[in-house]
Amino acid sequence: MSRVTVSIDPHVHSEGSYDGHEPVELILEHAAEIGLDAVVITDHDVIRESKRAAEIAPEYGLIGIPGVEVSTAHGHLLAIGVDRMPPRGRPYDETVRAVHELGGVAVVPHPFQRSRHGVRRRNIPTPGPDDDSDADGAVDGAGADGAVGEESETGAVDEVDAIEVFNAWLFTGNRNRRARRFAAEHGYPGVAASDAHHLQYVGRAFTELTIEGRASTAAVTADDVLAAIRRGTTTVEGRRAPIRMAAKHYVGAASRRSAYYARTGAARGVKATKRTAIDGAVAAKVAAFQSVHRTRRFLSWFA
């Protein structure tokens, strides 16, 4: 049987998200240039730009896959392959079920990192309890009311489809290691994603999927990608990405951004330049604050 491998970044934010910065056209152009086969726009609780990106993706030689990052009552959840918004603010297991009813796959992003709205271990619906403890002292496997996960009419828990075991913003930190252990314990496929909010980070981590029954990438559909995630034919590509793609990411992103705004008009270019300046000022302010903090801590050793 023929098979092909595709590379996908399943967690990217565009200017449609409250914390995103880039237009989807520029993200798609960049993704194609650095060798990705698909990128899923997963803006926070809005899906319009993601649907538009999925529609025009073939123009860039990419597989079009819509998605969204949903804010649930227990943390964020990636809904990949949906063309409608799942309900917001609902319990995690209910949201997982809603994603499945919409035909999508439910992926847990940056799990256990509460500062970024990552879900706690005990709120991820699993078939049964385990005895490990969460970082905040709660018993894993049980929800706030002690339930492990709501069962469907057939008696089976509606589980997530995959765990984001490598988030580029976390690199190889504790939360990524915990995510890998959790996925291994429960037999969930692992995916890697950039969680990019700026162009140069798109594809910094990505997932390779083995697609059965396709002779070329051009023949792969969004449904093929979703099926491969469900089957778990995934390979995490996070650690090598910054080394292998660094030059293309930073130099390429800068030139592509300049070329894009030159094509699309001065107004957007001025806006983007102003936004870049603000981002730089904020980064400088944070760096200065950190420097002062480190200096004070160093001097305190001699006090």
Image (spheres, rainbow, N blue to C red):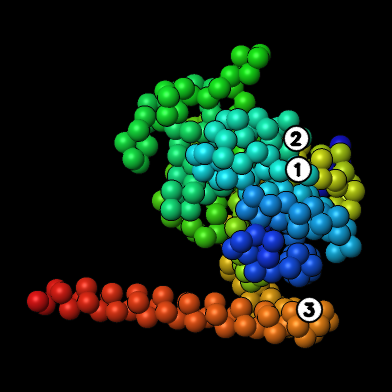
Q: Where residue 163 sits: x, y (%)?
A: 57, 41
Q: Secondary structure at mark 1?
A: loop
- In which quadrant of the rendered view does residue 76 lie? top right
Quick one: label 2 or label 1, which is nearer the N terminus?
1
Q: Which residue is mark 2?
A: 102
Point out the tag, 1 or 3, that comes first from the N-terminus.
1
Q: Is 13 located above or below residue 255 in the figure?
A: above
Asked whether the residues under the numbered discs 2 and 3 touch, taking CB atoms below 8 Å apart as contact, a structural biologist would say no
For the residue carrying disc 1, how many other residues have a C-alpha within 10 Å: few (<14), some (14-19), or many (20+)?
Answer: some
Name the image quarter holding the C terminus: bottom left
> Can I make out residue 150 in this image?
yes
Q: Nearer the viewer, residue 153 or 291?
A: 153
Q: Nearer the viewer, residue 57 or 49?
A: 49
Which amino acid type is shown beneath numbered disc 3?
A: Tyr
Residue ID at (66%, 13%): 154
- Residue designated by label 1: 84
SS for dot 3: helix
- Tell me the residue that label 3 is attached to: 260
